[in-house]
Image: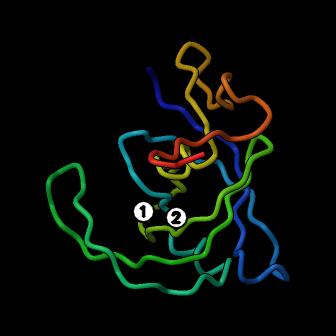
Amino acid sequence: MGIIYTHLRLANQARPDLEDIDAEALVDTGAIHLCIPEHVALQLQLGQLAPREIKTADGKSHLVPYAGPVRISMLGRECLTGALVLGDRVLLGAIPMEDMDLVIEPSRQRVTVNPLSPNIPMSLAMGMER
């Protein structure tokens, strides 16, 4: 599988008066969170939450800002999340992808909605009684 990018929109859920941002995001199922560059966090005027300690692929630990609330919109789906503020590009990790019930189509090098739930995102909720 090659490198996959996807188009998405980012917004500050707490500030509907601000413009959304169109972004091209690197899709990384090995990453957990949404990651955004500092200039995106500033443009969205995101609130700083408690910093997070992260471990990068080289095994080093770093303390980075965690900001939010961020609304991600793509493929007719949305989710709310926080974002690690680091790097020079938007990176879409596993948590927002799972929240929007998105999957990767390796043969087409793209992200798409889960074909098992094409109309509305599906989630698993264990232990619920009917």
In the rendered structure, the answer to whether residue 31 lies left or right of residue 113 reads: left
Task: Find out whether the residues at labels 2 and 1 contact each other: C-beta distance under 8 Å.
Answer: yes
Which residue in the protein does label 1 denote?
87
| Residue 118, placed above or below residue 59 | above
Residue furthest right as drawn: 17
In the rendered structure, the answer to whether residue 68 lies left or right of residue 120 reads: left
* Mark nearer the N terminus (2 vs 1): 2
| Residue 111, placed above or below residue 45 | above
Residue sitting at x 56%, y 65%: 81
Q: CA distance from mark 2 to mark 1?
A: 7 Å
Q: Quadrant of residue 29?
A: top left
Which residue in the protein does label 2 denote?
36
Q: Amino acid at mark 1?
A: Gly
How is the model colour-coded? rainbow
Crowd rating for badge 1 (residues with CA inside 10 Å; few <14, some 14–19, many 20+): few
Q: Secondary structure at mark 2?
A: strand
> Which image quarter is the N terminus in?
top left
| Horizontal and vertical percent position of residue 63 | 27, 76
| Horizontal and vertical percent position of residue 126 | 46, 45
Q: Amino acid at mark 2?
A: Ile
Crowd rating for badge 2 (residues with CA inside 10 Å; few <14, some 14–19, many 20+): many
In the rendered structure, the answer to whether residue 112 lies left or right of residue 94 reads: right
Residue sitting at x 71%, y 82%: 14
- The tag on residue 21 is none
Residue sitting at x 61%, y 71%: 40
Residue sitting at x 80%, y 34%: 119
